[in-house]
Image (cartoon, rainbow, N blue to C red):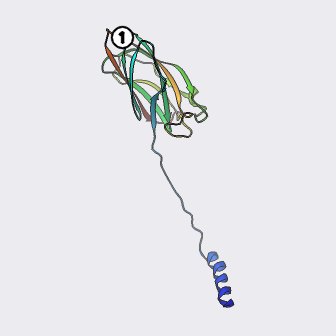
Amino acid sequence: MPARCLTLIAVLFVVPLCVPAQTVTLQANVSETVALSILPNFTHNGVDLNVVKSGSTVRLTLSSTDLEVRVPLLVRSNSGFKISVESQTAVPAHVSVIDVRPTGSLVSPEVVNALVSSEIDLNASQPLLVLTGPRVSLGGTLQSPNNALQVTLLIRTLALSPGQVVHLTFTGTAAPLIQ
């Protein structure tokens, strides 16, 4: 019986030394994601507002005689991104970025300085490119409160007649990383 135990112990020590080392390499890809939403408590005086969010698209339906609306858009991305806006009901007369701020510690510290606002050519075909930038989120999920970039857009529409409804669709898409 002790001879069997000694044989077992010897096998346990000798066999691992005889097996060649193996290297295992794992590779994974994460799909590029750009998610848009509107600040949850967004309201605007004199504007009847409806927001529909679906992943990388946010659609605002506005009914107002106010020609100017400030829209607080939240951007989350794990890659470079671009944001565009279009409307089938009224062409915006002016679109500009008036404020940019990170929502927390999981926002890339370089993103605010690396953003590129587009000069909007309102005579160009739609959709209109509004903003491009590098990766925003360093971690978290699409619902994390501290990994989004809050971009406030100033949008002026052409004169609205009473009761006219304007649909604005914001779309975020992945873009090559901006250096």
Identify which residue, 122 or 31, lies in the foreground: 31
Instruction: Kindly indicate the quadrant of the structure image that contains residue 66.
Output: top left
How many marks the image carries: the answer is 1
The quadrant of the image that shows the N terminus is bottom right
Residue designated by label 1: 158
Q: Position of residue 154 (x, y in %)?
A: 46, 16
The residue shown at (46%, 41%) is 32
Identify which residue, 53 or 85, lies in the foreground: 53
Identify which residue, 9 or 162, lies in the foreground: 162
The residue shown at (65%, 88%) is 4
Say which element carries label 1: loop
Graded by Cα atoms within 10 Å as few (under 14), some (14 to 19) or many (20 or more), the crowding at tag 1 reads: few
| 1 in relation to 111, above or below | below
| 57 in relation to 68, above or below | below
Mark 1 belongs to which amino acid?
Leu
User: Is residue 172 shown left or right of residue 139?
Assistant: left
The residue shown at (36%, 11%) is 158
Q: Position of residue 160 (x, y in %)?
A: 34, 10
| 161 in relation to 152, above or below | above
User: Is residue 22 shown left or right of residue 13?
Assistant: left
| 4 in relation to 13, above or below | below
The residue shown at (34%, 18%) is 166
The quadrant of the image that shows the C terminus is top right
Instruction: Kindly indicate the quadrant of the structure image that contains residue 157.
Output: top left
Q: Position of residue 74 (x, y in %)?
A: 49, 28
